[in-house]
Image (tube, coloured by chain):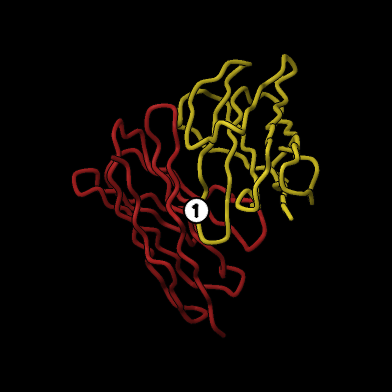
Amino acid sequence: DSGVTQTPKHLITATGQRVTLRCSPRSGDLSVYWYQQSLDQGLQFLIQYYNGEERAKGNILERFSAQQFPDLHSELNLSSLELGDSALYFCASSISQEPTYEQYFGPGTRLTVT
Amino acid sequence: GQNIDQPTEMTATEGAIVQINCTYQTSGFNGLFWYQQHAGEAPTFLSYNVLDGLEEKGRFSSFLSRSKGYSYLLLKELQMKDSASYLCATSGTYKYIFGTGTRLKVLA
């Protein structure tokens, strides 16, 4: 158990809908990262937050947005969903904003868009 | 640009030694990570190299050559539970870049 929690574990929804994925980082960690992992692809970095502020953006679509709240939990919002958005979404946390520390990954949310 | 290459699949026998290679190109290099990921599960941290050389941790060792943009993960005394994907990742300015992973199958 990494100490990172993600909810829900599974999500099935239809095209065009909007969903929110939630992540609580490990106690003491201030950085939260969001990743997308599709079947044939590696982990694609989406976005990073550190202590409530956005720190870095990766390949995040405009239909996707995220935020980190004062209690440090984070939410990833996916809207106007398409079939290609079906993937495993991981949240990871780290103690620092610098990418020189190991990340602790949550169990992931499996999103299926039908 | 930033790019990571590692073999897609490897097969080895229980008890053997296997070396998984990773080559990378990245700007603002801050180190190289290896993660293990079992199918359908979260990645878990294995090692971190920021200086050239070999880091040993039990049955797993990781090597880095910054001048060559090259790393490898060495797994000794392979066990069936080592069957998993091994992800090479570089860290740059505020970002981690992950490779697509090497799927290792350990045969009895």
Image quarter of the C terminus of chain A: bottom right
Q: Chain of mark 1?
A: A
Q: Count residues near mark 1 (Cα–Cα under 10 Å), then give few for <14, some for 14-19, many for 20+.
A: some
Q: Position of residue B8 (x, y in %)?
A: 42, 67
Q: Does A22 sit above or below residue A28? A: below
* Residue A46 lies in quadrant: top right
Horizontal side, residue B55 vs residue A69: left or right: left
- Letter of the red chain: B
Q: Which of the 4 image quarters holds residue A75?
A: top right
Whole-percent x, y for residue B94 in the image: 44, 27
- Residue B5 lies left or right of residue B103; in this view the side is left
x, y percentage for residue B74? 40, 62
Residue situated in front as seen by the camera: B94 or B75: B94
Which residue is label 1 attached to?
A: A42
Note whether A112 is above or below A29 in the view shown: below
Q: Residue at x 34, y 56 (%)?
A: B5
Q: Is residue A24 left or right of residue B15?
A: right
Q: Judging from the image, what is the letter of the chain drawn in yellow?
A: A
